[in-house]
């Protein structure tokens, strides 16, 4: 049984394709439930998986907290849990076997380091935060803030959640640009590409040049981000690899066979800026 967060971004769609594709390839019967960005739906799906007696439950938790009760039910049913992509906070670490996903603190650091280099350590920044309470939003903010702490010339003056969606990014950026002090903004840090792509539209509609008047760095590395870089509208994307199906099912098969697995499995990723975008675009798989 796999409970997916939703279909909020290009990253998520690629992640779902990778998981479904890998299950089919291995001949594994996958019960896939899309929670449409609602934690309650994920909890319901997990309870349904228990009732159906699945061998392993995997899920990408929308937010970090609120999982303890349902995870206790899963444990009582003797079903192992594999977390993927997003992390949870629980007081009892035996409530899941392993977690496979990106190091989102490191992604935030990489975005900050790139921006510090690009701007010579001087930037007045607007931040588009991911889904409130989700581990990638918490971690990316944290990693980025570490870089700001070392660069007194860089500061965040606006910060709000755009819920990891294009529409959310556009709407929040529009509001930022309408505020009386909008003129001071020189940079945008978006926690994912979809929000950056929405913000690019808002910036253009406000009569400004995205990528020039406002330097933009985001995270994920989806094709649309590379196209925006080639068009000169986005400056950098930090890769977050959604294609974790093969690594996820390697783990699931081991867990189902009762083998020992590491508690944390990381995903390898890079950073790509406007100077590499054209050459890299044909290689992008998501
Ligand atoms: O960056 C974003 C998606 O959890 C790492 O969720 C994932 C994030 C990804 O909506 O685009």
Image (spheres, grey):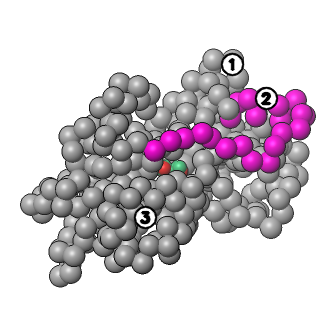
Contact, CB < 8 Å: mark 1 with mark 2?
yes
Marks 2/3: CA distance?
35 Å
- Span colored in magenta: 248-271
Helix, strand or loop under label 1: helix
Q: Is residue 268 magenta?
A: yes
Residue 248 screen position, x and y as percent: 68, 34
Residue 81 screen position, x and y as percent: 77, 45
The residue under label 1 is: 26
Q: Nearer the viewer, mark 3 or mark 1?
A: 3
- The residue lying at 35 percent from left, 48 percent from top is 236
Q: Nearer the viewer, mark 2 or mark 3?
A: 3
Marks 3/1: CA distance?
36 Å
Distance from mark 2 CB to nearest ligand 1 atom below 8 Å: no
The residue under label 2 is: 253
Residue 270 screen position, x and y as percent: 50, 41
Q: Residue 16 or 188: which is nearer the viewer?
A: 188
Q: Residue 221 or 92: which is nearer the viewer?
A: 221
Disc on the earlier residue, 1 or 2: 1
Residue 120 screen position, x and y as percent: 34, 64
Quadrant placement of the C terminus: top left
Looking at the picture, does residue 55 appear above or below residue 113? above
Horizontal side of residue 10 vs 52, given as left or right = left
Helix, strand or loop under label 2: helix
Could you say which disc has been placed on residue 129 in the image? 3
Disc on the earlier residue, 3 or 1: 1
Q: Is residue 107 magenta?
A: no
Quadrant placement of the N terminus: top right
């Amino acid at each position: 049984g796999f409970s997916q967060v939703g279909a909020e971004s290009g990253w998520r769609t690629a992640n779902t394709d990778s998981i479904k594709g890998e299950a089919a390839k291995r001949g594994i019967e996958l019960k896939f439930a899309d929670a449409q960005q609602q934690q309650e739906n994920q909890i319901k799906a997990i309870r349904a998986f228990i009732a159906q007696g699945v061998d392993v439950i995997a899920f990408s938790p929308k937010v970090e907290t609120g999982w303890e009760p349902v995870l206790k039910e899963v444990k009582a049913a003797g079903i192992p849990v594999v977390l993927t992509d997003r992390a949870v906070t629980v007081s009892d670490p035996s409530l899941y076997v392993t977690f496979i996903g990106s190091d989102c603190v490191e992604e935030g650091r990489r975005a900050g380091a790139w921006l510090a280099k690009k701007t010579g350590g001087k930037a007045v920044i607007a931040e588009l935060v991911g889904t409130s309470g989700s581990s990638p939003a918490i971690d990316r903010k944290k990693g980025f803030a570490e870089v700001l702490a070392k660069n007194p010339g860089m500061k965040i003056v606006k910060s709000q959640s755009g819920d990891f969606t294009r529409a959310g990014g556009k709407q929040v950026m529009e509001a930022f640009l309408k505020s009386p002090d909008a003129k001071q903004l020189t940079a945008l840090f978006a926690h994912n590409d979809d929000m950056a792509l929405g913000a690019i539209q808002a910036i253009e509609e406000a009569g400004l040049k995205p990528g020039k008047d406002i330097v933009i760095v985001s995270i994920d590395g989806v094709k649309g981000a590379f196209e925006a870089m080639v068009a000169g509208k986005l400056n950098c994307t930090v890769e977050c690899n959604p294609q974790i199906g093969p690594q996820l099912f390697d783990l699931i098969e081991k867990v189902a066979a009762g083998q020992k697995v590491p508690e944390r499995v990381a995903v390898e990723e890079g950073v790509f800026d406007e100077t590499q975008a054209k050459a890299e675009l044909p290689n992008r798989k998501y």
